[in-house]
Image: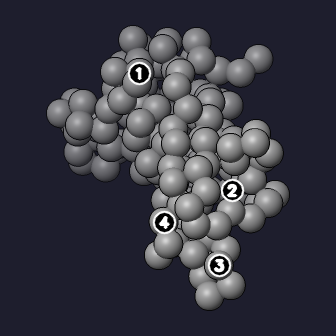
Amino acid sequence: MEKFVHTVKYYETDRMGFTHHSNYVRWMEEARVDFMDQLGWGYQRFEDEGLISPVTAIECKFKHSTTFPDKVYINVSVEECRGIKLKLKYSMTDESGKVVCEAASEHCFLNADGKFVRINKEYPEFYKLICDLMEE
């Protein structure tokens, strides 16, 4: 999988010139959308299938600051995959390879009626694809 690259925008920084912490969560979403597109299961496909995948938890550990116009490289990996739950990990590094943030997001899968979907049973192709990417 290709890493997602985000260039820190001027408006993403605070008065001190550092990237505001709330932006890292936005970058996680950008990277996750790109990751799913690379898998062939982009969010448009999810919606076409009648699925949504809301975020149920977020965790961020900030290691080093970033500033305008740094490039941040975001590697997305699968940490856990169950029938209705998916946990993704994000490793964000700067151009030198120094880790600037380690993060994770948890997601569930719902149908249009808001009912849980067991992707392992209803979308086994997607489930296998995700599980095959799971870290050992």
Asked if residue 44 lies left or right of residue 81, the reply is left
Residue identifier under label 4: 9
Circle 3 crowding by C-alpha within 10 Å: few under 14, some 14–19, many from 20:
some
Residue identifier under label 3: 17
Residue 109 in view of the camera = no
67 above or below 54?
below
Rendered image quadrant of residue 89: top right
For the residues marked 3 and 4, what is the alpha-carbon distance in whole angstroms? Answer: 11 Å
What residue do we see at 57% from left, 75% from top? 13
What residue do we see at 24% from left, 47% from top? 113
Residue 53 in view of the camera = yes
Q: Earlier in the sequence, mark 3 or mark 4?
A: 4
Give the SS element for disc 4. loop
Asked if residue 17 lies left or right of residue 1, the reply is right
Instruction: Tell which residue pokes out farthest to the bottom in this image.
Output: 15
For the residues marked 1 and 3, what is the alpha-carbon distance in whole angstroms? Answer: 36 Å
Circle 4 crowding by C-alpha within 10 Å: few under 14, some 14–19, many from 20:
some
Residue identifier under label 2: 59
Q: Amino acid at mark 4?
A: Lys
Give the SS element for disc 2. strand
For the residues marked 2 and 3, what is the alpha-carbon distance in whole angstroms? Answer: 23 Å
Q: Earlier in the sequence, mark 2 or mark 3?
A: 3
Circle 1 crowding by C-alpha within 10 Å: few under 14, some 14–19, many from 20:
few
Q: Earlier in the sequence, mark 2 or mark 1?
A: 1
Query: Where residue 8 sits: x, y (%)?
Result: 54, 61
Quadrant in which the C terminus is drawn: top right
71 above or below 116?
below
Circle 2 crowding by C-alpha within 10 Å: few under 14, some 14–19, many from 20:
few
Give the SS element for disc 3. loop
Residue identifier under label 1: 39
Q: Amino acid at mark 2?
A: Glu
Query: Where residue 81 sits: x, y (%)?
Result: 59, 27
